Amino acid sequence: MLKSKKRSDCPISSSLDIWGDKWSLLIIRDLMDAKECTYGDFLKSPEKIATNILAARLQNLEENKLIEKLEHPDSKAKVLYKLTRKGVDLVPVMIEISLWAEKYFSIPEDRKAMLKEVKKDKAGFIKAAIKELVS
Amino acid sequence: MLKSKKRSDCPISSSLDIWGDKWSLLIIRDLMDAKECTYGDFLKSPEKIATNILAARLQNLEENKLIEKLEHPDSKAKVLYKLTRKGVDLVPVMIEISLWAEKYFSIPEDRKAMLKEVKKDKAGFIKAAIKELVS
DNA sequence: AACTTTACTTGCAATATGCAAGTGCAAATA
DNA sequence: TATTTGCACTTGCATATTGCAAGTAAAGTT
C-alpha cells in the first residue's frame, strides 16, 4: 500500500489508486457519520480494523489530503481526524454506494431512514451534509 | 480475495466486501464503456491487469452477480462478459467517482466531455446509460 | 497437420494483511 | 512525587494476496 503509483489517467483508476481498498472508505464513512474521530473511535467501528492497517490508511489519506489532523481541545494525548474539502466531496459517492447497497443487500434501519431522506431531495441532502461537514 | 466474509451490515462495508479492491471497478468501467468485453479486451486496458488477477476478479464478480458470461456469436473459443442489472446499477456510483476525480485530478478530454453531458442533465444521462446497457 | 488465438492456470517471489504484543508520551490517580 | 492508566501508534511475524512469467487446453486458421 505504500507505493501507489498512478496506473492511468482514467478517473476511476486515479480514484482507486488512493482509496481503492477495503478500509479507506470505511474511515471516510466514520468521519461523515461523526465529523471528527479519534484514533480509538476508528478502532471501535464494527468492522474491526487492525491497528497497524488503520495507521497506514490514515497516513495515506492524510498524504492525499482527504483527511487532516487536528489538536484535541481536551488533551494533547488525543488526536482528532476530520475530512478536508476533498474528503467531504466524496459525500455523493458514498450516497450512491449506499443506495446501490440498499437495493441489493439488507442494511440497518437507521441507514434506510437516512436514504429515505436522500430520495426526497438528493441535491438538498448532499448540500446540507457537505455544509455540516465543512464547518 | 477468495473468502470475502461480510464484515458488517453497513452498506459501504457490504459493497466494499464485493468490489472494494483496486481492480474490480476497472472491469466494471470497461463493461460500461464497451457493453460487452472478452477476456482479452480486459487485458488490453491501460492499467494492465495481470491475467491471474483478472480471472479471479471475473469469477468473484460473476459469483456476486454483477457480471455474466455470454456465448460469443463468432466463436466458441471466445467468451463475452457483460454487466447484469446489479452491475449496471453501479452507473451512478461510477459517475460520482468520475465527477470527484475530475475535480481533483486531470483526466482525459473524452472523459471530460462525457461529464459535461452528465452535468447538463444527470438523471437523464444515467437513465439513458442504464437503458443502453441493459438492452 | 502445424500454427495461432483465446481463455484461462500454475509456480513463485514480492508485497500486503491481520493478529498480538510492545513503546512512548500525556494525563489521571494515589 | 510516584504510579498507573489512556491514547496513538509501532513492531514482529505468520498468513494471504499480488504480480510477473510461463504453461496448458480447446478452438479456429492456414
Image (cartoon, coloured by chain):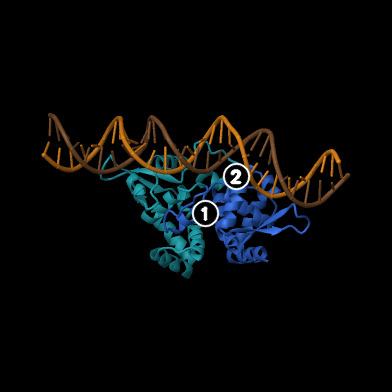
Chain colours: A cyan, B blue, C orange, D brown
Q: Nearer the viewer, residue C23 or B109?
A: C23
The percent position of residue B107, horizontal first and vertical second, equals 61, 47
In the picture as drawn, the residue positioned furthest to the bottom comes out as: A120
> Can you tell which quarter of the image residue B86 is in?
bottom right
Callout 1–callout 2 Cβ contact below 8 Å: no
C29 in relation to B62, above or below: above
The percent position of residue D8, horizontal first and vertical second, equals 33, 40
SS at mark 2?
A: helix
Image point (62%, 48%), residue name: B55
> Can you tell which quarter of the image residue A108 is in?
bottom left
Residue B49 makes an appearance in the image: no
Residue under numbered circle 2: B53
> Label 2 sits on what residue type?
Ile
Image point (65%, 52%), residue name: B30
Q: Whole-Å distance between the Cαs marked 1 and 2?
A: 15 Å
Residue A92 makes an appearance in the image: yes
Chain of the residue displaying label 2: B
> Label 1 sits on what residue type?
Ile
Decide which of tag 1 and tag 2 comes sooner along the chain: 1
The percent position of residue A58, horizontal first and vertical second, equals 42, 42
The percent position of residue C4, horizontal first and vertical second, equals 80, 42
* Disc marking residue B18: 1
Image point (51%, 60%), residue name: A96
Chain of the residue displaying label 1: B
A103 in relation to B38, above or below: below
Image point (64%, 57%), residue name: B32
C11 sits to left or right of A132? right
Q: Nearer the viewer, residue D9 or B9?
A: B9
B50 sits to left or right of A74? right
Q: How many marks?
A: 2
